[in-house]
Image (tube, rainbow, N blue to C red):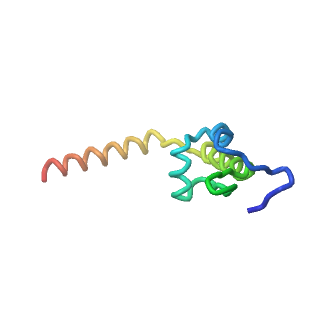
Amino acid sequence: MNITSTDRIVREAERASITGVPRATAWLQIRNGEFPKPVPLGPQARGWLLSELLAWVGARTAERDNYKPRSAEMKRRALKRRVIREKQERAE
């Protein structure tokens, strides 16, 4: 964890505003290792490093920018496989 001189800790309301992720979803993602971990500030207080939140948002943006939708041919093949699988399941 690198803390820069301009980095700061943000609390829950600002975290939600920056990421757009609801509190419960953020905690589930933290538990699954998919979201930055909070910094303990006291017995019950937590905050997040602004730099880590911004990096997380940047990574989501990169995922979006690299998204390649399925081609029409790939969609047809997937549909055909699904139809065949459903027919096989009905035959059993």
Seen in the image, is 25 located left or right of residue 16? left
Q: Position of residue 2 (x, y in %)?
A: 78, 61
Query: Looking at the image, which is closer to me, 84 or 21?
Result: 21
How many numbered discs sit on the rendered protein?
0
Q: Position of residue 92 (x, y in %)?
A: 13, 53
Q: Quadrant of the N terminus?
A: bottom right
What residue sits 53% from the left and 52% below the top?
A: 29
Q: Position of residue 7 (x, y in %)?
A: 80, 51
Which quarter of the figure has residue 5?
Answer: bottom right
What residue sits 67% from the left and 56% below the top?
A: 42
What residue sits 74% from the left and 49% below the top?
A: 9
Question: Farthest residue in the bottom direction?
Answer: 1
Query: Looking at the image, which is closer to me, 30 or 75?
Result: 30
Seen in the image, is 30 located left or right of residue 62? left
Residue 68 lies, with reference to residue 41, above or below; the image says: above
Query: Looking at the image, which is closer to me, 5 or 68?
Result: 5
Seen in the image, is 22 located left or right of residue 73? right
What residue sits 19% from the left and 51% below the top?
A: 88
Question: Farthest residue in the right direction?
Answer: 5
Q: Position of residue 13 (x, y in %)?
A: 65, 39
Question: Farthest residue in the front direction?
Answer: 43
